[in-house]
Amino acid sequence: MKSIVKILLFFIFTPIILSCSGYGKKLEFNNTEVYYTKEVFKEEAQKLGKFLVRSEFADGKEKSVQLTKNKETNHYIFRMVTNPEAAKNKAYEILFKAVAIQISDSVFNKAPVDFHVCNNTFKTLKELPFKTTTNDN
């Protein structure tokens, strides 16, 4: 009987433990996971998720992003999981900067949005600070 209880407890608590990732709370929009940290409100993450659907970023393919905020600079930080090669590619860098500008304009009323290219555990591979145009150096 004890072993049955242990097995039941394992199956009940394992998903709970696994869902407590350190990435923040999770919302899902068209198969895109939007994690958000305590530095931002749920409503801000929902607004971002709706934008990702409208812009067709959230296109049904599995993707993961995270929204947080830097308390020192007051910049939002949009963190996106991608492959390591994208962090080194100049063409992708231009695209990522453009995405940050779109998010700033369309979601956060022109508030600055830094873009972090991340690996699959949200470790930052490259930081792209907010600039108002993609041509700024």
Image (tube, helix red, strand yellow):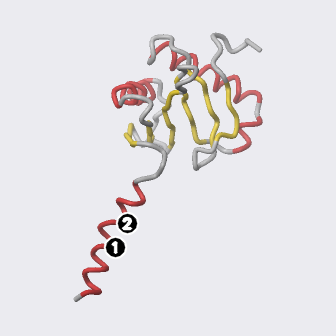
Q: Position of residue 36 (x, y in %)?
A: 43, 36
Q: Residue furthest front?
A: 72
Image position of 115 (left or right of 51): right
The residue shown at (65%, 24%) is 95
Marks 2 and 1 close (CB-CB < 8 Å): yes
Q: Position of residue 114 (x, y in %)?
A: 60, 24
Image position of 85 (left or right of 18): right
- 10 Å neighbourhood of mark 1: few (<14), some, or many (≥20)? few
Q: Residue furthest left?
A: 1
Q: Residue furthest bottom?
A: 1
| Above or below 97: residue 12 | below
| Above or below 59: residue 129 | above
Q: Amino acid at mark 2?
A: Thr
| Above or below 98: residue 119 | below
Marks 2/1: CA–CA distance: 6 Å
| Above or below 19: residue 73 | above
Image position of 54 (left or right of 118): left
Q: Position of residue 9 (x, y in %)?
A: 29, 73
Give 7 or 134, whichever is nearer the viewer: 7
Mark 2: secondary structure: helix
- 10 Å neighbourhood of mark 2: few (<14), some, or many (≥20)? few
Which quadrant of the structure image shows residue 50? top left
Q: Position of residue 131 (x, y in %)?
A: 65, 14
Please give the label number shown on residue 14. Answer: 2
The residue shown at (73%, 12%) is 136
The residue shown at (35%, 31%) is 42
Please give the label number shown on residue 108. Answer: none
Mark 1: secondary structure: helix
Which residue is labeled 1 in the image?
Answer: 10
Task: Locate the C terminus by quadrant.
Answer: top right
Task: Locate the N terminus by quadrant.
Answer: bottom left
